[in-house]
Amino acid sequence: MLDTQGLAVCRPPGLFFSELMSHAQGEPPKAIWKKDGARLVLVLSGDWLRGGEARVVEGEEGWPDGFETEGLGKFDSTLPAYLMQRLRAVEVEEPGLEGLPENLRGLMELALKVPERSDAKSLDEDPHGLKLLGIRLTATWKAVESVLEFTGETVLSLGRFFTGRARFRGSDFWLTLQECGINALPIVSLISFLVGMILAFVGNVQLANFGASLYVADLVGIAMVREMGVVMTGIIMSGRTGAAFAAHIGSMNANQEIDALKTFGFNPFDFLVLPRLFALVLMMPVLTVYSNVVGILGGMLVGAAVGIPPALFLTEMLTAIDITSSSLGVFKSVFFGVAIAIAGCLQGMKSGDSSAAVGLATTRAVVASITAIVVLDSAFAVIFTILDI
């Protein structure tokens, strides 16, 4: 239990129970709204204790501009729970806490930092029908607006960089480049090798029925350089690097490090987003080429197992692909890198100031990155088909 000065009160159980009963029999807890000129003031009095008398509420409306707590006695979680319930009912984004005791103010500020869980409300309050449709359309529009705004900030930041006005640490860039490149090689190698083997296995099962097992080389080569190499690399980097970007920047946001950068005169966008964007855009084409080579080696291994010599496999594959085909995946990888970097940094910059918000931002970054990759790849497939490439 806390008193109004925020001091912990420790008493023997019997004495505590007797005092609690005496408080319950005293003045009941009261919450009285009153007008003080143009201000709405909430007067809190009595002892707000669990198991005490029922609270008395008069003139309840909106969220007060200030509090009067001269008559407030002892309280436990009953009082902050009532205030939070009232706050959720009126949906105030930045509630004022002027006039509350220091200990109660601290509890309220701590509670406000944790976002309300959407599944904590009763089922009766869940929107449905047109209301649900409107809420989802509004949320979708806000998300699109946020992406467009962040993309515009990216363009402006690039303009500042090429004119020599953007500032970020070179060590951050090289560290991010290492994380996006060399440190990602093991997982890219494993996934690409297995994808190449799977393509060869599946292709051989079908082509062997027509005595055309040799064309497994064509299948693996074209599939890897046009689609599978860049798509699998993009998905890997979404789950690995995009999530890391969101978690890192989100943690800085939660610890108010981004506010500190603004205080010292640094542009957080230039300082945090630009090095990550450059590093990922530079490394995605390299990782894509590497993924293509490793995937083809996996298909070549399966080809050797089904009777296709490696030299013959390589010769047949080179007749099926040309410079144009082999460059399509590398071309798409640049756009995939931009999408992954923007999604990860956007969710990190827009993250809340709690650990739960950082986790949510990381999840959203991965989902947004993979969705963007699939959408972009579909768009490129249509464009390449129209151009007959």
Image (tube, rainbow, N blue to C red):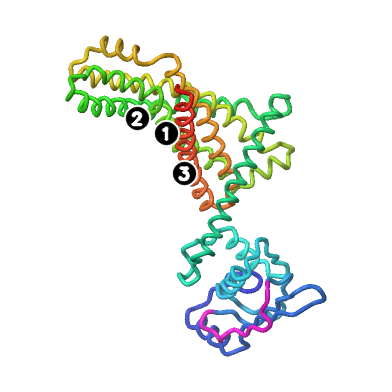
Asked if residue 54 lies in the magenta stretch, the reply is yes
Per the image, label 1 sits on a secondary structure element best described as helix
The reply to whether dot 1 and dot 3 touch (C-beta < 8 Å) is no
Residue located beneath label 2 in the image: 191
Magenta part of the chain: 50-62
Residue type (three-letter) at the residue carrying disc 1: Ile
Q: Is residue 9 at least partly visible in the picture?
A: no
Query: Which residue is at the front of the view, 190 or 72?
Result: 190
The reply to whether dot 2 and dot 1 touch (C-beta < 8 Å) is yes
Query: Which residue is at the front of the view, 17 or 212?
Result: 212
Q: Which mark is residue 236?
A: 1
Query: Label 1, label 3: how many angstroms apart (C-alpha)?
Result: 12 Å
| Residue 268: % across, % down | 66, 38
Q: Determine the residue positioned at 54% across, 35% down.
A: 341
Quadrant occupied by the N terminus = bottom right
Q: Is residue 9 above or below residue 132?
A: below
